[in-house]
């Protein structure tokens, strides 16, 4: 199998940052096996001076 760069693969770290800034709504999936949860969450990226995303910050509403 030959390794090739995929059509949707980030070309550099700034691509990742620009994508998250442009599309801030994401699915956060937790759990394992058949027992998992998916939560739709708006996020903002935190990046270092080079433009590398180092973390995502979001806010969850308490489940009642």
Image (spheres, helix red, strand yellow):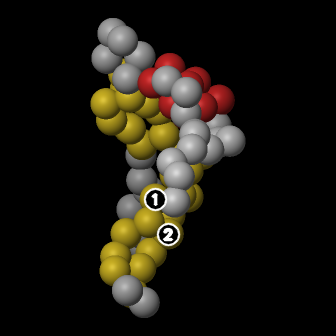
| Residue name at image x 49 percent, y 24 percent | 12
What is the spatial separation of the Cα atoms under label 1 and label 2, in whole angstroms?
A: 6 Å
Q: Which mark is residue 63?
A: none
Task: Look at the image and tell me whether residue 21 can be seen.
Answer: no
Q: Which image quadrant: the C terminus?
A: bottom left
Lower position in the chain sequence, tag 1 or tag 2: 1
The image position of residue 43, as x and y in percent, is 48, 40
User: In this view of the protein, which residue sits in the foreground, 3 or 15?
Assistant: 3
Lateral position of residue 49 relative to residue 23, left or right = left
User: In this view of the protein, which residue sits in the foreground, 56 or 18?
Assistant: 18
**With respect to residue 14, does 3 lie above or below?**
below
| Residue name at image x 55 percent, y 33 percent | 10
Question: What SS does tag 2 mark?
Answer: strand
Residue of label 1: 28
Q: Pointer 1: residues within 10 angstroms few (<14), some, or many (20+)? A: few
Q: Pointer 2: residues within 10 angstroms few (<14), some, or many (20+)? A: few
| Residue name at image x 46 percent, y 59 percent | 28
Question: Which residue is farthest front?
Answer: 1
| Residue name at image x 53 percent, y 52 percent | 2
The image position of residue 44, as x and y in percent, is 47, 32
User: In this view of the protein, which residue sits in the foreground, 55 or 15?
Assistant: 15
Quadrant location of residue 46? top left
Task: Look at the image and tell me whether residue 35 can be seen.
Answer: yes
Question: What SS does tag 1 mark?
Answer: strand
CB atoms at circles 1 and 2 under 8 Å apart? yes
Count the marks: 2
Quadrant location of residue 15? top right
Residue of label 2: 38
The image position of residue 32, as x and y in percent, is 34, 80
The image position of residue 6, as x and y in percent, is 62, 44
């Amino acid at each position: 199998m030959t390794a090739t760069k995929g059509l949707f693969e980030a070309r550099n770290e700034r691509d990742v940052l620009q994508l998250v800034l442009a599309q801030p709504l994401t699915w956060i999936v937790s759990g394992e096996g058949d027992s998992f949860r998916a939560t739709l969450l708006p996020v903002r990226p935190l990046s270092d001076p080079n433009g590398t995303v180092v973390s995502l910050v979001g806010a969850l509403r308490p489940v009642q």
